[in-house]
Image: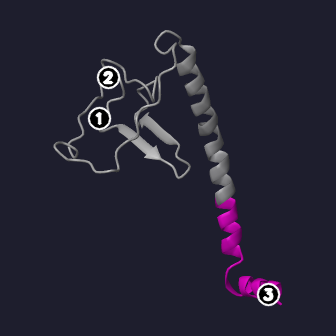
Amino acid sequence: MPMRQDCKYFESRTYPSGDTVRKCDLDLAPEAPWRCPDDCPKYTRRLADVNWSHGTLVTPPTPSEPPSLGEDDSIAALLDAAEDIVNAAGPSIRADVEAEQARAKRRGGVRGFLDRRRKRD
């Protein structure tokens, strides 16, 4: 079954580069962005969109399916591996940002003012 754009857990985001992410917010579509499971237990029709008419801000068309989709479990495994990499990087990135914010906070007040003044002169 194609991705159910009318499901309240479907999300699509287009970035300035033109790349579009199409996914299930519950991570229940292992073949996203192409397909949802036929018998998804969490499918819930999006109520806010019922009978709405959309203008030009419509989800871009789904990319073409790879020929082996549905027959080859390696696609889902590859997507899961990519997700694991991104999820593993998250805590490290967060720690870096928090450390940078803590340094900036320590440099506030008089010391920060003097540091900024020295750099300007």
Q: Is residue 98 above or below residue 1?
A: below
Residue 40, disc = 2
Residue 114: image quadrant is: bottom right
Q: Residue 33 at what x, y percent from top left?
A: 45, 30
Q: Give the range drawn in magenta.
A: 98-121
- Mark 3, other Cα within 10 Å: few <14 / some 14–19 / many ≥20: few
Q: Residue at x 82, y 87 (%)?
A: 118
Q: State which quadrant residue 100 falls in.
A: bottom right
Query: Mark 1 falls on what kind of element?
Result: loop
- Tag 3: residue type? Arg
Residue type, label 1: Cys
Is the magenta region chiefly helix, strand or loop? helix
Circle 2: is it few (<14), some (14-19), or many (20+) Cα within 10 Å?
Answer: few
Per the model, the C-alpha gap separating discs 3 and 2 is 60 Å
Residue 102: % across, % down: 67, 67
**Identity, as a three-letter code, of the amino acid under mark 2:** Cys
Query: Can you identify the residue that label 3 sits on?
Result: 120
- Asked if the residue at tag 2 contacts the one at tag 1, i.e. Cβ–Cβ closer than 8 Å, the answer is yes
Res. 99 image quadrant: bottom right
What residue is drawn where x is 40% and y is 34%? 26
Q: Name the residue under label 1.
A: 7
